[in-house]
Image: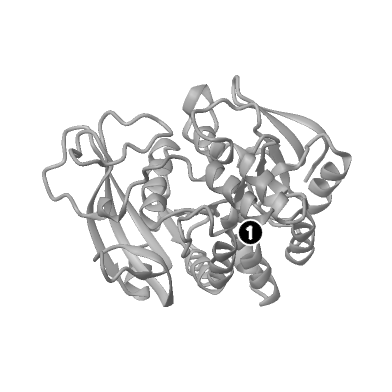
């Protein structure tokens, strides 16, 4: 039975047969075309460098985190929600390209943090380094983020059959993510919280990291984070236990769920059919109570129509694709805990029940 399930995972999550390789990280030093947007992405990784492909990072776990700075060029004709991947005849006029890569020390990384604020992205299962990097740049551009984008990338195998290896790799990365969150929230002169977007298995990593910070007495770090969990691949009972440890956040956690997410349905099957948080039914009174008692917002985005697979529907939502009007600031404006359904037309959130003003 297990090999059959793994085959289903491969078919459901691998997406397309041809995925870009690490060669897309080769810097393009030509003059950028008119209208191209240059995005600086600071990156922290627990991946080790690939010996055979200089400048790339794979699934091997690093003894200590790597600190990096990239410049990514987004083409003039970029379509919201999309990554125009380089190919054999790629150019900065048509494709995302890396313009520069700069290794940093932790101290050098800290010096490059802008005083205007930063936004952090944490990718999910089956994600390669370059895929996470380009996704970070794309989200930054399409969501019109005022903050500078930061990527935390853990050593996912980038292989749909490596689910357990990825989960172990995410657990391996907790201490490094906790250190990054301490660093990003250190400057008390920046009044607004640090927005954090964590997807899929990256949401599990993030919640475990919040528990670690709370148990270490670092409530000051938690108070300066505004977290969105997109399609979180977290056992629902584990999430209840995590929230019991973390407690209500100063800036309520937002959870984006969808009932038609095939990846999370497969994850549930692999876990003896235990419910995943990202599949939560907002009409269920137990889910509504969980939202109110934990002080979180659970938002059903099942009806959002985008070109993205259900497990990555958050990309189209945040990017404003296909008529959606949401960006990362929308959810921060809701001062309620409870269960909601996102109405694509007009970007409205309809309360389902159990909502409680803070």
Q: Picture quarter containing residue 8?
A: top right
Q: Could you say where residue 63 lies in the image, as x and y percent from the top left?
A: 43, 80
Residue in view at x 55 percent, y 74 percent = 175
Judged from this view, the residue extending furthest toward the bottom is 63
Picture layout, residue 216 above or below residue 134: below
Judged from this view, the residue extending furthest toward the top is 345
Q: Would residue 271 appear left or right of 61 to someone viewing this image?
A: right
Picture layout, residue 353 above or below residue 4: above
Residue in view at x 32 percent, y 71 percent = 108
Q: Could you say where residue 235 lies in the image, as x and y percent from the top left?
A: 73, 56
Residue in view at x 50 percent, y 72 percent = 176
Q: Would residue 120 appear left or right of 341 to someone viewing this image?
A: left
Judged from this view, the residue extending furthest toward the left is 30
Q: Could you say where residue 220 lies in the image, as x and y percent from the top left?
A: 62, 68
Q: Would residue 104 appear left or right of 164 to someone viewing this image?
A: left
Q: Could you say where residue 219 lies in the image, as x and y percent from the top left?
A: 66, 68
Q: In this figure, what is the number of numbered marks?
A: 1
Picture layout, residue 228 above or below residue 315: below
| Residue in the foreground of this view, choosing between 49 and 32 | 49
Q: Would residue 127 appear left or right of 141 to someone viewing this image?
A: right
Q: Is residue 223 visible?
A: no
Q: Can residue 84 be seen in this view?
A: yes
Q: Picture quarter containing residue 50?
A: bottom left
| Residue in the foreground of this view, choosing between 167 and 115 | 167
Judging by the rendered image, the residue that carries numbered circle 1 is 204
Dot 1 falls on a residue whose secondary structure is: helix
The way the protein has been coloured in the rendering is one colour
| Residue in the foreground of this view, choosing between 260 and 330 | 260
Q: Picture quarter containing residue 60?
A: bottom left
Residue in view at x 50 percent, y 33 percent = 308
Q: How crowded is mark 1: few (under 14 residues within 10 Å), some or many (20 or more)?
A: many
């Amino acid at each position: 039975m297990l090999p059959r399930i793994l085959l289903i995972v491969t078919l459901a999550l691998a997406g397309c047969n041809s995925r870009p390789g690490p060669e897309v990280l080769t810097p393009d030093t030509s003059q950028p075309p008119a209208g191209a947007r240059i995005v600086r992405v600071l990156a922290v990784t627990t991946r080790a460098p690939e010996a055979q492909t200089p400048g790339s990072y794979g699934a091997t776990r690093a003894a200590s985190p790597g600190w990096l700075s990239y410049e990514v060029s987004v083409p003039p004709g970029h379509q919201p929600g999309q990554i125009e991947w380089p190919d054999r005849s790629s150019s900065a006029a048509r494709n995302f390209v890396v313009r520069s890569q700069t290794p940093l020390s932790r101290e050098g990384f800290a010096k490059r943090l802008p005083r205007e604020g930063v936004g952090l992205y944490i990718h999910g299962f089956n994600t390669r380094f370059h895929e996470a990097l380009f996704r970070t740049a794309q989200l930054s551009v399409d969501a019109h983020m005022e903050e500078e984008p930061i990527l935390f990338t853990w050593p996912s195998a980038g292989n749909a059959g490596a689910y357990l290896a990825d989960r172990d790799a995410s657990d391996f990365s907790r201490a490094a993510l906790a250190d990054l969150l301490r660093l990003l929230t250190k400057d008390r002169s920046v009044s607004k919280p640090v927005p954090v977007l964590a997807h899929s298995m990256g949401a599990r990593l993030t919640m475990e990291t919040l528990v670690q910070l709370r148990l270490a007495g670092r409530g000051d770090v938690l108070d300066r984070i505004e977290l969105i969990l997109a399609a979180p691949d977290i056992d629902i009972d584990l999430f209840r236990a995590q929230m019991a440890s973390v407690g209500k956040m100063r800036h309520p956690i937002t959870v984006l769920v969808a009932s038609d997410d095939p990846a999370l349905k497969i994850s549930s099957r692999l876990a003896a059919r235990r419910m995943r948080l990202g599949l939560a039914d907002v009409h269920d009174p137990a889910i509504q109570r969980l939202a109110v008692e934990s002080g979180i917002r659970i938002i059903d985005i099942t009806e959002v129509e985008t070109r993205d697979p259900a497990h990555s529907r958050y990309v189209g939502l945040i990017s404003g694709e296909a008529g959606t009007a949401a960006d990362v600031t929308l959810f921060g404006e809701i001062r309620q805990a409870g269960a909601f359904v996102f109405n694509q037309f007009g970007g409205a959130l309809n309360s389902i029940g159990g909502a409680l003003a803070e």
